[in-house]
Image: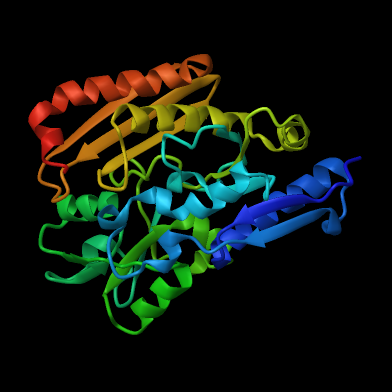
Amino acid sequence: MQTKTLKIGTRGSALALAQAHETRDLLIKAHGLREENIEIVTISTSGDRIQDRPLAEVGGKGLFTLEIEEQLADGRLDIAVHSSKDMPTFLPQGLHLSVFLEREDPRDAFIGREVKTFLDLPKGAVIGSASLRRQALIHRARPDIKVINFRGNVETRLRKLADGEVDATFLAYAGLKRLGLGHVATELMDAKAFPPAPGQGAITVESRIGDDRVDALLAPLNHLPTSTALACERAFLGSLDGSCRTPIAGLATVSGGRLQFHGMILLPDGSEVHEVTGDGALSDAVEIGQDAALRVRKLAGPHFFTDWF
């Protein structure tokens, strides 16, 4: 039994803390540890502090992990717990995403103030969203809808919605469920028509490469179907040089010993969309994602990508 204290780094939002506690509880169960063996360390990140601008303007998704990864790299933390969809495809040297917990429902949840479904919104309604992917999907289906930047944690966004700042918003259903707020969703979006972000719904643990003690502790937590699906999705994202500046969607599912993938790229205004699918053996997850990225690039043509920046 390990008795040395394990330090888990996390952001300070209610959702981030819920994910850290879920990871801690799984470690306790897997190894017979006591709560005092595991310390959860809350870290304020640049992404949390900057609320008045879109992430694309100030540095991207890495702002949610920078300060945490600094402490992980220098040994002040043993592991860091993240939402997989927030993780850049390229990590700091010496760090890796070592395990993925079993994925929750990856779909987006629509939350309407006066109407229950997205398509029932009146013409000219206002939706709040900070996600370029969601913004592009909204514009694709409803060009008449106005979308405004909507930063903040889950509770902040729900408060802004209740206060009438917007008519509706979209949030990850997995996050709502982890916070015991699944009931606030008024519609769950179809994953084919309104595909999620790569990694959405999955918790990942980041650790130092070659840390044998931590590797042994984390190994029982890895959910193989989830890690296989995420390998595909992150390969798709990485091959497209995906960041928060690029509207990219992708979802891999594992069934019957096979992996199926559906990916989508969009112009930010939703005026042009290209979709791709893939299927293959679980052992080929990375190659399926990379191949899908190559094929969708050819479908879109070089002009498509120059418009992203």
Classify 117 as above or below 241. Answer: below
Classify 113 as above or below 303. Answer: below
Q: Is residue 194 left or right of residue 45?
A: left
**As rendered, which of 13 and 65 lies closer to the eye?**
65
Q: Position of residue 77 (x, y in %)?
A: 67, 49
Q: Position of residue 113 (x, y in %)?
A: 33, 76
Quarter containing the C terminus: top left
Q: Is residue 303 left or right of residue 170?
A: left
Q: Is residue 184 left or right of residue 134?
A: right
Residue 65 appears anywhere in the view:
no
Q: Position of residue 207 (x, y in %)?
A: 63, 38
Residue farthest toward the front in the current orientation of the protein? 74
Residue 306 appears anywhere in the view:
yes
Q: How is the image coloured?
A: rainbow
Identify the residue shown where x is 30% and y is 57%.
58
**As rendered, which of 190 and 180 lies closer to the eye?**
180
Identify the residue shown where x is 63% and y is 30%.
209
Q: Position of residue 298 (x, y in %)?
A: 16, 21
Identify the residue shown where x is 55% and y is 52%.
68
Classify 287 as above or below 30. Answer: above
**As rendered, which of 222 and 142 lies closer to the eye?**
222
What is the quadrant of residue 167 in the picture?
A: bottom left
Identify the residue shown where x is 91% and y is 40%.
1
Residue farthest toward the bottom in the current orientation of the protein? 163
> What is the number of callouts on the image?
0
What is the quadrant of residue 240 in the picture?
A: top left
